[in-house]
Amino acid sequence: MKRVTTTWSAAVPALLALLALGACTSSSDTAPTPSGTAISLSTHCGIDDLEVDGRWYERVGGRLDDGQGNPPAGWADPTQSGVVVIAGDTLVFSDDAGHRESFRARPAATGPKQGCA
């Protein structure tokens, strides 16, 4: 059996060149990774809107419920713990259960769109 020996002397300059090119990439070429804020999303009457830091948001696509005004299967009731990330007028809620819902800002809103009993 023939023994093959690999030498790294040829690979090292190529690897260093690639690393140098990567170092030249500006940080403005990629968007920063936003950090999330822990939140308890109200789900009791379905998922419709929420308030974060005094600003109201509504779910993109309208209310999400089971057709009877309750949270859909797989969602906790009365609240679902998760994280929100806000970018401009868009908010994204996600949780450990795999839910991911987008919301958009409701300018001038001072409360929820409708009450929940």
Image (cartoon, rainbow, N blue to C red):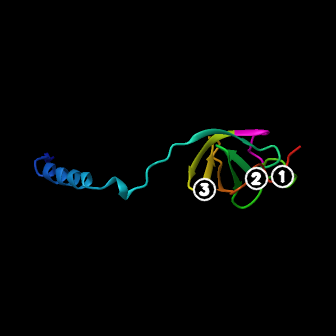
Q: Disc 3 on helix, strand or loop?
A: strand
Q: Is residue 24 left or right of residue 58?
A: left
- Residue 19: % across, % down: 22, 50
Quadrant in the picture for residue 14 = bottom left
Would residue 13 appear left or right of 74 to someone viewing this image? left
Tell me if label 2 and label 1 are in contact, CB under 8 Å. yes
Q: Residue furthest bottom?
A: 61
Q: Quadrant of the C terminus?
A: top right
Task: First in sequence, mark 2 or 1: give its number.
Answer: 2
Magenta stretch contains residue 63: no
Task: Residue at 71% x, 40% y: name it.
Answer: 80
> Quick one: 39 or 51, which is closer to the camera?
51
| Disc 2 residue type (three-letter) | Asp
Query: Dot 2, how many residues are within 10 Å of its Cα: few (below 14), some (14-19), or many (20+)?
Result: many
Determine which residue is flagged by label 3: 90
Label 1 and label 3: CA atoms lie apart by 21 Å
The crowd level at tag 3 (other Cα within 10 Å; few <14, some 14-19, many 20+) is some
**Residue stretch in magenta:** 73-80
The residue lying toward the viewer, choosing from 9 and 70, is 70
Residue 48 circle label = 2
Q: Element under label 2? A: loop
Query: Could you say whether the residue bearing mark 1 is in a helix, strand or loop?
Result: loop
Q: CA distance from mark 2 to mark 3?
A: 14 Å
Mark 3: which amino acid? Thr
What residue is rendered at 62% in x and 46% in y? 94
Q: Main secondary structure of the magenta part?
A: loop
Mark identifier at residue 114: 1
**Picture coordinates of residue 65, whole percent (x, y):** 80, 52
